[in-house]
Image (cartoon, rainbow, N blue to C red):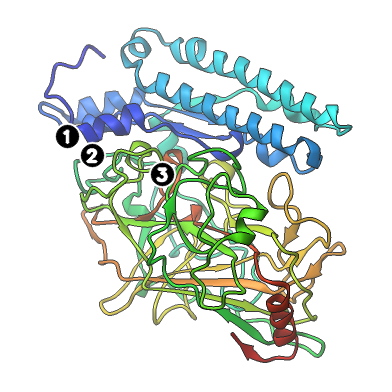
Amino acid sequence: MGRNTRKRRSPLAVRAVAASAALALGGGGLIWANYYASAHEENSSPNTTKAAAAQVATISCPDVGQKLPDVPNQARTEVDGELATLDQQITDAYQRLATTRDAQARDAQFVQNSILQPLKDRRSAIIDRIKLEISRVGGTAPDSLNTLAGCNATTADQTQANNGGQQQGGGQQQGGGQATASPSAPAGGQQQGGGQQQGGGQQQGNGGQAGNGPVAADFVDITKVRPNVPQKARTRAGGSSGTFSSTCGVNANKKFNTDNVIVAPGVTNGAHHLHDYVGNQSNDAFANNDTFAAAKTSCSNQGDKSSYYWPVVRIQNGTQDFDQNNDGGGKEGNVGQIQQAKQAQIKFVGNPKSKVVAMPKFLRIITGDAKTTTNGLANANAHWSCTGFENKVQLTTQYPICPQGSSVVRTFAFQSCWDGQNIDSANHRTHVAFADAQGNCANGFKAIPQLTMRLVYNVPAPTLQNGQIKNAYAVDGFPEQLHKPATDHDDFINVFDENVMNKMVNCINRGQRCR
């Protein structure tokens, strides 16, 4: 492709291409260098767009962090730092990919020789340092780590062929339970992806206003989806049927940041998308347990200083919000008008088969996976629905279009089994687990109060016209994850006072309803 002499693209399109560095937690992710941002410019044509599609590359890097479940505690700070360096390397590779169009057009081997191979070499050096940090404190790194250095690239057409298309069957769960007051496992189903920007301030085709989603196939009219919610497990003798609710508001304080203190402690903008926070008011990248314990809380029960946080939802209607030019915001493809929940309901529930034990203070739990486009749906636990439909339909791989008078609902059910020892794990998953459909906790894990959350939003219903989505809403995420609904996730850090936690446990085990 020759030098571009057409009308200069908009600043937003430039940022979507050049500054939207795709950064995935744990050193893994897909890097999407989107050249469709110029498809709406003067003199563009279907042939121009087709030629661009042949050039656009995605780079898929293995997720190193998820392969490290057993990092010794003494090495975790150093390993977290090295994982952050892997993330930065992916960012650098993306920026080079997005700014070398002419070189890629002239040399078919440019991406391999000038981007992929140097990236592999740099990743190999960091992986070697991770292994050294683990062995230095007496641990053993997995032998497979060195195989994770290489990354792959494909054209945009290939990516669309692999991930695109309209989901059939309404995005029903294939493997999980409903995320309500019953035990829940991660949701299955087929992830849908792909899509590029075809227009300007609103969705025109498949790319969203930042060129990285969502697409028309990510939405479904909920009135046309068949019921898919399984029956709740019945509480048996010896089970625990009580509930404990905590009222913590809807982030009226407007506490936002793009940090992720669980996965990327000490790293500013470690989440690369914006979070809503309720409860603990001191959560940022540099908070520690002492910080959390001394903090103020938005919860009405001052004995609950826990931190509850989740990615914001935005309407992609052309509105530029306060973070349009910020890292984690517009610079990373998270654009549009931020929506805050009108309700944020926090409830802890019991186990249908056994009593629950107290959560340890400062227990960290992440439910769902912000990187399902990269990692697949094994850890997906997103549940989308509409008021009036929650007991019938829960969606994982599509956003619902709700009928008039109905509101969008995001629901989460956290892992409800704990290993009895650790407040976190190196991959932030293996210290907690989901109970099975009957409520059993396997492998010596203990049942704990299950956190369930219900977020309700008044968002205008998007419209589908001729295969295009207009005024779409979407959850914030990494640019390379294409704002897919399956990437929704939620985070929790337990900072309950011991007396309040004991009250919660007694209430749940006695079958009472408490606050």
Instruction: Check whether the beta carbons of the residues at disc 1 and disc 2 lie within 8 A of each other.
Output: yes
Amino acid residing under circle 1: His
Q: Quadrant of residue 459?
A: bottom left
**Dot placed on the residue nearer the N-terminal end, 1 or 3:** 1
Q: Quadrant of the N terminus?
A: top left
403 on left or right of 382:
left
**Dot placed on the residue nearer the N-terminal end, 1 or 2:** 1
Residue 482's disc number: 3
Residue 40's disc number: 1
Residue picked out by circle 2: 198
**Dot placed on the residue nearer the N-terminal end, 2 or 3:** 2
Above or below, comparing residue 48 to residue 285 in the picture: above
Above or below, comparing residue 278 to residue 203 in the picture: below
Residue shown at the point (41%, 44%) measured from the top left: 482
Q: Secondary structure at mark 1?
A: loop
Q: Label 1, label 2: how many angstroms apart (C-alpha)? A: 6 Å
Q: Position of residue 499 (x, y in %)?
A: 72, 78
Q: Position of residue 333 (x, y in %)?
A: 35, 40
Q: Secondary structure at mark 3?
A: loop
Rate crowding at label 1 as few (under 14), some (14 to 19) or many (20 or more) other CA atoms within 10 Å. Answer: some
